Image: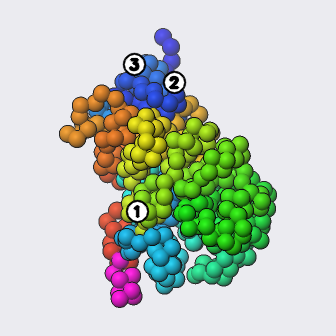
Amino acid sequence: MTAFETCDLLLCARWVIPIVPEGFCLEHGALAIAQGKIIALGTQTQLRARFQARETIDLPEHVLMPGLVNAHTHAAMSLMRGIADDYALMPWLNEHIWPAEAKHVSPAFARDGVRLAIAEQIRGGVTCMQDMYFFPEQSAEVAIEMGMRAAVGGAIIEFPSAYANGAPEYLAKARAMLEHYRNHPMITPILAPHAPYTVSDQSFTALMQLSHDFDARVHCHIHETAFEVEDSIQQHGMRPLARLDQLGVIGKNLTATHMTQLLPAEMERLAEASVSIAHCPESNLKLASGFCQVDRALKTGINVALGTDGCASNNDLDMLGEMKTAALLAKAVAGDATALNAAQALTMATLGGARSMGLEQSIGSLEIGKQADVIALRMDELDALPVFNPISQVVYANHRRQVSDVWIAGRARLRNSLFVDIDSAAIAANARAWGKKISERNS
Ligand SMILES: [Zn+2]
């Protein structure tokens, strides 16, 4: 008789969607996890015969898939959910968001906001986020405390804030983050220049030197609106992408967020340089910023990731909802119902996001050797039945409340729809207290 191999956790699910190969779904599948990593994927019959598991969990009406990767957010801004709705980008920033941030943002605001954002995301099946905000030290610490994986970058911007006096100080703090978190198992430090219109040539040059020295990724809002492009032509005599290309920013380490204004030649250039796009369809819709031509970008060979953006422009961090919006919007924009099919949308929300953080070797799909960032979704709710194609169901008919279980690096964060070691009542009480404080000072 052959001896059993051991594993910490054996997950047996009705359907397993590994993401690689794209569009594949394994029926009655199983996943074996040991020391936080995936060590086997197969049918339940195969893996039950092969492994003696410390714990076996049956998920008889569930889809098992990799955790969702939110490729672009400003987590702390969850405390500003709904603070200023129904404005265009520039009045929204200039008259509402930036003044509110000047009044309220502090290390305590960042900590409490990021806690709220991470709890919301874990509840909705997100296991990794790419964050850009002030006080990234707080974001990283809270992510570690809550067992969330994160790529974290402090915003780099020319104007002063509670976090730094100006670009040199933002850059010095960014450098300290890169040094502190290099090789950390849960935190990937990145550089996060806010946008071409808020960062000078000199600061871009300095941060690209840091990117080069630390092989750090660069995450930036680019071509969010037509106004941004026109403004750059007025100020610099060229489009923002052309300016960034001259400054050496366009390269394999860049993730360009939004990209609603793209000429065919610019798409070719991004593909050739292996730039990733972080697509935020709901934020773009809400701020009427424009539409990213996702289908065309994918056909040109560009990696496209999916993000919710911050809560002040969305107003949630719901990646399942974002996926459906992305798939529907891509069809409308391309005038083609075959554009961005369900399997492609799912790849964008998982492996695409992992690639945009340089983490494609460790997360984004269920493959042997990768981190066990895994989620389960119930498929037996009335509004998810019957199930013909689980991949279509996840993208077009699922709601995030159907997420039942979440493991990050093999550690349970949500079981049977309940948080594990996360005090959601305390997080909610804090969010209410901040809401009260912000409305009092604003009135
Ligand atoms: Zn953003």
Label ID, residue 286: 1
Q: Residue at x 43, y 42 (%)?
A: 335
Tell me the kind of residue under disc 2: Glu
Q: Nearer the viewer, mark 3 or mark 1?
A: 1
Tell me the kind of residue under disc 3: Thr
Horizontal arrangement in the rendering, residue 194 relative to residue 22 (left or right): right
Image position, residue 235 (x, y; %): 69, 73
Label ID, residue 69: none
Color scheme of the displayed model = rainbow
Q: Residues within 10 Å of mark 1 (few under 14, many from 20)?
A: some
Disc 3 from disc 2: Cα separation: 15 Å
**Quadrant holding the C terminus:** bottom left
Name the element at disc 3. Answer: helix
> Pointer 2: what residue?
5
Tell me the kind of residue under disc 1: Lys
Question: Do tag 2 and tag 1 residues touch (Cβ < 8 Å)?
Answer: no
Sooner in the amino-acid sequence: mark 3 or mark 1: 3
Residue stretch in magenta: 435-443
Is 245 in front, or is 407? 245
